[in-house]
Each structure stands twice: as C-alpha cells, then as structure tokens.
Image (spheres, grey):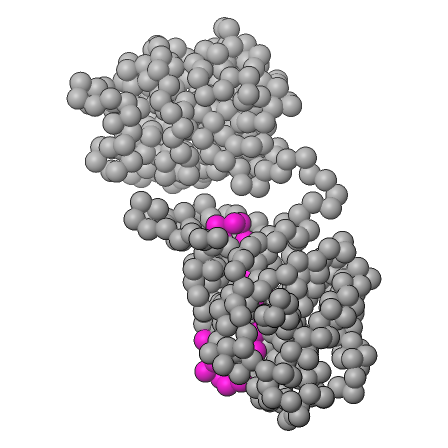
Amino acid sequence: MEPKTTDTASYLLNIRNLTIEDYDTMIEVMNRSYPTMNEVWHKKHIQKLLTIFPEGQVCVEDNGVLVAFALCIVIDYSVFGDNHTYAQIIGKNASFDSHTDDGDTLYGIDVCVDPEYRGLRLGRRLYDARKEICENLNLKGIVAGGRMPNYHKHSNELSPKEYIQKVREKEIYDPVLYFQMSNDFHVKKVLRNYLPDDKDSKQNAVLIEWNNIYYQDNVDIGAAKSHARIGVVQWQLRTVRNLESFFENVEFFVDAVSGYKADFVLFPELFNAPLMAEFNEDNAATAIRKLAGYTDEIRDRLQQYALEYNINIIAGSMPVYEDEKLYNVAYLFRRNGTFETQKKIHVTPAERGDWGMTGGDQVQVFDTDAGKIGILICYDSEFPELGRILAEQGMQILFVPFATDMQNGYLRVRICSQARAIENECYVAISGSVGNLPKVVNMDIQFGQSAVFSPSDFAFPSNATVAEGTPNTENTIICDVDLNDLKHLHTHGSVRNLKDRRHDLYEIKLKK
C-alpha cells in the first residue's frame, strides 16, 4: 500500500474488528511503524487471535483501508504478576495459551498506527475501544508493557526510572509513554529484558495499567446500585394536636415518596419542633429537653416506617438528652431494619446559648444499599473539613437537613452545600422547613428551599443543580442520581479535586 498523502486526502475513518483479510495491510503498516524491530506477526498468529478472542482485535480504516490496529488477549493476572516478559504473555511461538475466557485482565500485546496518520489520534480511538471491551467484559483493567522508544537517547545519563520521571514532568518527550499517560494509564514499574528486540528502549519497558472503575466483583442481588432515587421533603411546620397527628404527617410523606420507588427520603433538621408547642410556658432550654422525651418513640415509629415502606429514611434531626447533655441528632433508618445516628458537630451560638446544646465528636460514612452516604446537620455543612473527611471515607451522597429562619441563613447552607458537592465530587441533598410556629420559641419562623446538588462537569446539569423545590412552600423533590458518573468524574473529570490534592503540602485528618 502506498503511503497516503495527508495534505489533500479526504478522510473517512471507521473503527471495526479485524479480519484475516486485513493481514497483508497490517504487515505493511507494521514495517513502516517499527523499522528497527525485527519481528512481525505471522498470518497464523493473527488467525489464532481471531479464533480465540475475535472481539479483542480491532482496527481503524480510512476509506476502507486499514491504517491502525490493536491486539489484545484476556489473562488471569495472578498467574503472571508484575514480573513477566512479553514472551511469557504471548506464549511459546506466539501460541497465546495464556488467553482465558475466565481471566480478569485485558492485556495489550500490540498497538500500531501508520506513521502517515499519527496526527489524527487514532491510537486514542484504539485505546478507547479497548476500554470499552474491558468494561463490557467486566474485567478489572488493562495491563501492557509499554515501550520507551526515545530512551536510547538518554540511557547514558538516566536510569529507566529517572527517564520515566522526566517524561512525566514533560522534561523529555517519549511518544509512546507520553501517549499512555495521557490516556489515563499509570506506570506500575519498570520491566527489564521485556522485549529483547526493542533496541530503542534498551530492552526496557514500563508496566502500565488502566483500572476499570466500573468493575464489579461477584455482583449479587441486593448489592449497592449504580443509581439512586432521592426524595426530599420540604416540610411545613404546622401546629399538631398530639404525637399521633405528627406521625400522620410524617407517614404521608414516607408513603408518597416510597410510592415513587425512591431509595431515600430526607426530612429537615428538628422537623419534630411542632411538638414543642405544648411546652411553650417553659423556658427554651427546658422546652427542648422535654421535646427530647419524644425522640425514642419517634425513632421506633420511623424505624417501622422504613421497613414497611421499603425506603431508607434520613430523619432530619431530633434533640437527644443523654448523660445530662443535649445533642442535635440525625437518624438514618435503613429499610433492612437497622439504624445509625449522626450528632451535629458544630452547634450554633443560638443552640448553645438558648438551649445549652453540646456538639458530637464522630464523623462517619454510612453504608446503604444505594451507596455510601454522609449526614451533616445544617451548620456542619459550612465547615469544609467535615465534607472532605467524609469524602476520604468514600461518601457518594451527602444529606444536609437544615432549619433556617431568614434567607441569609438559608443561603449560607445552600452555597456551602453546593461547594461541598463540587470539591468532594459527590451529590448533596438539602432539606429545610418552611412556615411558622407561633407558639414555639426559636422555631417560630422558617425560610427554606430544598434542593439536590451535583458536581459541576459535563455529566451533570449545567448549573450543578439536579432538582430544587419552590421556596417557602411545602413540596417534595424526587430525582435520580447516577453514582457511576461520580466514578467517571474522579478519574476523567475536567478537573479532579480529590485526585489533584497536594498531599505533600497539606492534609486533613480526624484527631479522634
């Protein structure tokens, strides 16, 4: 095949699987691509690959003529480990006996692009095709031995390790290694005597790896889901006759949200405040301690609702009085019957001064059947350290129940919650109360607008808001969030806040 003159050509590119009829053109492309390499694939080798793993052999054609190709097999990586040679991978006489349909890793054995086409990023198309194969087969990742074709120019003054570091820092250009790093592969180690005929690399190679973030090991019914449906209640504070009247209001929303097959329903901070009206004659500190007397009964009823309605309930928060200390506590009631608690860490000046509240001392992520979640009550959302600690523990969804009297207080919670979503690459749901309680001191007026926020990147809404309610009106939000989009963001986002942190310069850690 005559090399194509790219200055006047009209390209018509297509990616497809290889066929044995492509063999002669493949060899022509290889000879132009690797003039210093002595070996080329024999026809029987390509036929063997097409027999044992046809979907793994791909090529790019231009106007029907092959101009690039990639070959790979599936291996059980534990058989070879990190110390191996190319010959061990492909087997004696290129038998490819290492290929197994039960393997866990896609191993790249060749990528070749016609030199006349190297400005069209065809290698990226081939690598993307490999990644798609890896994801479709639910393999752990892709591994290959990468050449260092420019290493011979620097081998007298640099070790392979030093050379790799220089390439990483853009001090030296290596077309193969630079390309691999640009396609999300990371270097695991240097392989010596990997490919004896590779004189340009001085027989060295880099063991490169790409991890499949969508890989699932032993997927079972009941395992964590890739999507979650969130229901958020914008709760009207209203006078209630008694505890049963309060339960009727709560059960209505649990029933309604569960009817939409939601995984979570979120209530606001101190959503049981209407029950405090009967203690209005007492001072504020005494009234809220009496309100705490209802918490155990409310806890038991909500635990029952979670089971009966098959939904995980984040019960805003309620006052809890224990060991002569008053806490503001959020509850997670799982639909399997278990529950967890999260105390408010930072109490506001009003909570401390009027009620005598104490802050908690545990920051933790909770496992649920629809992802890992964290809970920060109102004021806690305004402390970025807490969200970052939860992100370090794998949080995917942050729930923020809040209670704010004026718009400026609400905006503090909203803006900070949006920041937590972006900087921690997670979803954040906020739920507040609206309306008035004339007979309840400190909870008499409310301003609120509930919402669900996302990170800010291509996979998410352009304004980083999945859904939001109508301000100061009782209503419900129900929306879906894609947890896989978070995984993709962590490794492929336009910016990667978690990945790009300077651990060498700063850190955030719990003291307890």
* Residue at the extreme top: 93
**Residue at x 51%, y 55% (from the top left corner):** 390
Left or right: 81, with 475 as reference point = left
Is residue 222 visible in the rendered image? The answer is yes
Q: In this view, does 158 lie above or below 369?
A: above
Residue 159 placement (x, y as % from top left): 24, 22
Q: How many marks?
A: 0
Q: Is residue 440 left or right of residue 222?
A: left
Quadrant the N terminus occupies = top left
Residue 410 percent across, percent down from the top left: 50, 79
Q: Residue at x 31, y 45 (%)?
A: 504
Relative vertical location of residue 358 with respect to residue 369 in this rendering, above or below: below
> Residue shown at 48%/12% (left/top)?
88
Q: Is residue 128 magenta?
A: no
In the rendered structure, the answer to whether residue 20 lies left or right of residue 203 reads right
Residue 335 figure quarter: bottom right
Can you give x and y, in whole percent of width and height, for residue 449 in the image?
56, 78
Nearest to the observer: residue 202 or residue 359: 359
Look at the image and give the residue range highlighted in magenta.
391-412
Taking 252 as reference, is 360 above or below it? above
Relative image position of residue 512 (x, y in whole percent)? 48, 53
**The furthest residue to the front:** 324
Whether 75 is drawn above or below 495: the answer is: above
Residue 6 in sight in this render: no
The residue that appears at 35% across and 12% down in the rendered structure is 193
Examine the structure image and report whether residue 395 is included in the region drawn in magenta.
Answer: yes
Asked which quadrant contains residue 149, the reply is top left
Q: Which quadrant of the figure has residue 297? A: bottom right
